[in-house]
Amino acid sequence: MNYSADIRKTERRFLPVDFVLSDWASAEPYFEQLLERDISASDALEQWLHDQSELEAAISENACWRQIRMTCDTENKELEASFNDYYLNIQPHVQRYADQLNRKLLESPALGKLDQQKYRTFLRNIRKSIELFREENLPIQSEIAVLQQQYGQITGAMTVEVNGSEYTLQQAGKFLESHDRDLREQVYRKIQERRLQDRAPLNELYDTLIALRDKEAKNAGFANYRDYRFRELGRFDYTKEDCLRFHEAVEAHVLPLVTRIYQKKKEKLGLAELRPWDIDAEPAGIKPLVPFSSGEELLRKTVDCFKKLSPFFADCLLRMGEMKHFDLESRKGKAPGGYNCPLAESGAPFIFMNAAGQMSDVTTMVHEGGHAIHSFLAHPLELNGFKEYPMEVAEVASMAMELFSMEHWDSFFTDAEELRRAREHQLERVITIFPWIAIIDSFQHWIYEHPVHTHEERTAAWVSILTRFYEKVVDFSGLENYRSHGWQRQLHLFEVPFYYIEYGIAQLGAIGMWMQFRKDPAQALENYCRALSLGGTRTLPELYEAMGLTFDFSPERIKVLMDFVQDEMEKLER
């Protein structure tokens, strides 16, 4: 591999070096210039595409920073106002001009002279955008963008008191690893009760989002939002029927393994009944895994881990550190979850997460680190549109990194038994996440096929889906009220609808990459980097092929991969 993390901000040739997006008036003249320019000659068309890309990148990065700053501090009204200003007063104009520019591109006499292989997926996305654009949807999309952020504001304010101290829900989660079972139950119930306090506003927020999304889809001529969203997400290579078969495969081939994992946990803890507050606990005498104590230490150890895989991977994180592109620790007023946000001009992305000193935080960090590597590798591509890679590949980048890095988790654990437990924890997570992916995806199919429903009908549908994918070892008796509102903790439902099946598809790809890695680490990493450096310039199946994989999430393939993971888990148990 010969890749460099010496990333440089994209040089401006069309925009002034000191251009800052302050309001729509500051950007409009550049859109007008592009709209009025003659692009009938091939060289003029290519220059026009580069200039448009430069403008897109500058605006995209400005919007991203507004979102990053707001999620880092949801209580700051100025940051909220800045974010809202973009989506209410700038983005609608950007979308309107983008549609006009897309149409101008396709009408250019020089279009056929472009390298059709090079621009193939780019032009496919342009045609998709034109197909979906509706003027009447612009205010709806702005309203949705603003409303979605209310989820982070509501949940970011959630805290509980434990032993006289206040904790965010993420921080409180560490008590679920305690040897004191009574304390675990107490904290579990406090977390659930705190979530229930806001069930009404979250229900109402979701009601509004569902109605707006349904209207957006109907305006664009689709029967429902699910079908519209599939198109919007560029799901050219699989269908809703494939997703339903994925659900069935999880039920048939993954649930038995999940049952085995929880049965083993129950026996290890010596419990007559395994309750939800027991899942993260260890038997008496075995200390919870403590891989780090601060965000600074988490980053330092991750850099060390990545360096053992590839110096390039470590250099990417170091470069981000120099640029202060991390916000890692959990605190009150910070939005929940974690993300890697690509920055189109700067190149080096921003990683946001809510670390609280737990093993799951290591998984999140290396996961987002995989996304960051993807951002670095795709940044040199010449057009912003070339970097719009499919999410099903983006998540392979992150989930494969979880598995690759596991080989070097001695950066986090010097004790051999703790290292074995950490790897076991990761492989258990690889398997146990599949039912939740199927649950969230199945729930969204129901929601948008039935956009008009009562809260009672929504709860009944949710409980029915939960029951379908329930492994029947963990005892939830008496906790039905908590379970019936469990969907509200999944931010994707509110903020990025239908973005969840990708985790399942990509987890399968990641396991496939790990199988390669176990046989030939150097070749697997070369396949990984080569595919990620293609960005979105190839179709989804072609990107998988570049990784040495076949794009296949059939029941048969799922069974093969689950058998492999089970074998690896058994090796750890010996």
Image (spheres, grey):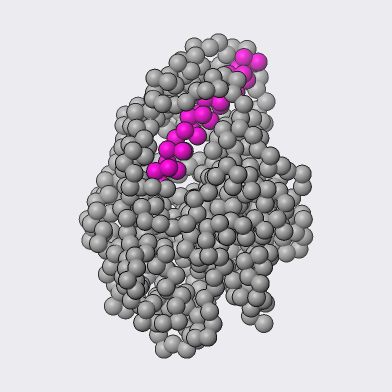
Q: Is residue 45 magenta?
A: yes
Q: Is residue 413 magenta?
A: no
Frontmost residue, 4 versus 35: 4
Q: Residue furthest front?
A: 164
Quarter assignment of residue 91: top left
For the point 40% across and 85% down, the residue is 273
Where in the figure is residue 456, as x and y percent of width and height? 23, 61
The rendered magenta stretch, by its main secondary structure, is classed as: helix
Drawn side of residue 159 relative to residue 535, left or right: left
Above or below, comparing residue 516 to residue 528 in the picture: below
Where in the figure is residue 186, as x and y percent of width and height? 33, 76
**How many labels sit on residues?**
0
For the point 46% across and 75% down, the residue is 177
For the point 71% across and 42% down, the residue is 4
Where in the figure is residue 396, as x and y percent of width and height? 60, 53
Frontmost residue, 556 versus 331: 331
The C terminus - image quarter: bottom right
Frontmost residue, 384 versus 465: 384
Where in the figure is residue 441, as x and y percent of width and height? 43, 56
Do we see residue 530 in this rendering?
yes
For the point 47% across and 33% down, the residue is 62
Quarter assignment of residue 183: bottom left
Drawn side of residue 456 relative to residue 349, left or right: left
Q: Which residues are magenta?
A: 42-71
Frontmost residue, 301 versus 519: 301
Do we see residue 216 in this rendering?
no
